[in-house]
Amino acid sequence: MRVKCGVDIIEIARVKDSIEDLGTKFLNRVFTQKEIEYCENRVKTKYEHYAARFAVKEATFKAISEMIDNKYLISWKDIQTTNDEQGRPKVEILTTVNKDIENIDVSISHCKEYAIANVVVLLNE
């Protein structure tokens, strides 16, 4: 078994500006419907939640990029962040690229200006 990791940090203002400038065009290109519903339900902190999910997508891609022959085989919406029953974030890869993935662990944090995500992937050998 191999362990791969990825990390990403993003300025929340960049995501907020993209959402305000491009609206649903940006949201529907980058986020799944579940992610949009989750973030929109966090009215006061929705941009922080969008930014955190964006960081998860980037961190996950970094962790699994070695196993992808063509980076165009995976899109933003193929990586989805949801929450378990206790509210802990979890990552799902919604494409066949995940055949070698045993487990994915994710940690997300955000403050006023930044969101960060750390992803650890266990790969079958």
Image: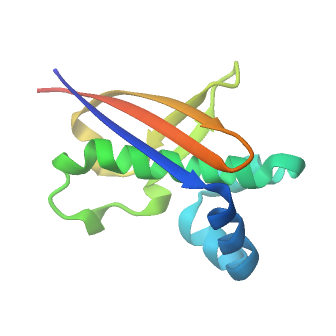
- 85 horizontally vs 59: left or right: right
- 41 horizontally vs 125: left or right: right
67 vs 17: above or below: above
Instruction: Report x, y in % for residue 105.
Output: 43, 26
- 55 horizontally vs 15: left or right: left
Residue 34 visible to an observer of this rendering = no
Please give the name of the residue rendered at 24% of the width and 50% of the height, measured from the top-left corner. Answer: 65
Please give the name of the residue rendered at 59% of the width and 60% of the height, measured from the top-left corner. Answer: 31
125 vs 18: above or below: above
Please give the name of the residue rendered at 62% of the width and 74% of the height, measured from the top-left corner. Answer: 26
Quadrant into which the N terminus falls: top left
Q: Quadrant of residue 22?
A: bottom right
Please give the name of the residue rendered at 47% of the width and 40% of the height, measured from the top-left corner. Answer: 92
Residue 24 visible to an observer of this rendering = yes
In the rendered image, the residue lying farthest to the front is 113
- Protein image colouring: rainbow
Instruction: Report x, y in % for residue 49.
Output: 70, 47
Front residue of this view, candidates 71 and 110: 110
Instruction: Report x, y in % for residue 58.
Output: 43, 52
Quadrant into which the C terminus falls: top left
123 vs 1: above or below: below
In the rendered image, the residue lying farthest to the left is 125
Give the total of numbered labels. Answer: 0
Instruction: Report x, y in % for residue 97.
Output: 27, 49
